[in-house]
Amino acid sequence: MSVIAEIIDTLENKVEKLFMKMKSLEKNSQDLKIELTKAAQVIQTQSQEIEALKTQCETLKMANALLGSDENKRDTKLKINSLIREIDYCIAQLSD
């Protein structure tokens, strides 16, 4: 009987260690999920900031071009032509 008792004790110890390991892994998993959520929020915030900065950069480029910068004359002409086409389209739509 003592051999069976030792086997049962050993088995109980192993099961207890497995439960402790399982709880540790569950806590680790929960911590990683929280960290992942925080990282996703940071990524979303940074993406919004990037889009805002891109818009600001385009606005600054346009303002610089409109001020007569030699570097952006082509872009300025293209933008003005695009705006004129849009205005012509709107006028055509209104006259119909």
Image: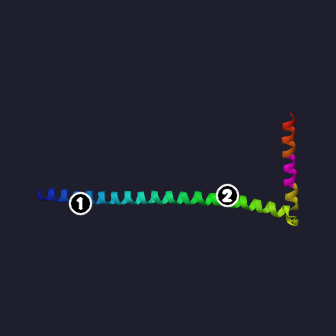
> Which sits in the foreground, 34 or 52?
52
Task: State the predominant SS element of the stretch in magenta.
Answer: helix
Q: Quick one: SS at disc 1?
A: helix
- Residue 36, percent from left and from top: 50, 58
Residue 6, image x, y percentages: 17, 60
Neighbor class of circle 1 (other Cα within 10 Å; few <14, some 14-19, many 20+) is few
Circle on res. 51: 2
| Position in image of residue 37 (x %, y %) | 50, 57
Q: Which mark is residue 41?
A: none
Can you say which quadrant of the picture contains the N terminus? bottom left
Query: Label 2's element?
Result: helix
The image quadrant of residue 9 is bottom left
User: Mark 1 near mark 2, Cβ–Cβ under 8 Å?
Assistant: no
In percent of the image, x 37 and y 57: which residue is there? 26
Q: What residue is rendered at 74% in x and 62% in y?
A: 57
Q: Is residue 87 magenta?
A: no
* Identity, as a three-letter code, of the amino acid under mark 2: Glu
The residue under the point 15% across, 56% down is: 4
Figure coloring: rainbow
Amino acid type of the residue that numbered disc 1 sits on in the rendered structure: Asn
Q: Which of the two discs, 1 and 2, labels the residue nearer the N terminus? A: 1
* Highlighted range, magenta: 78-85
What is the x, y in percent for residue 65? Answer: 84, 62
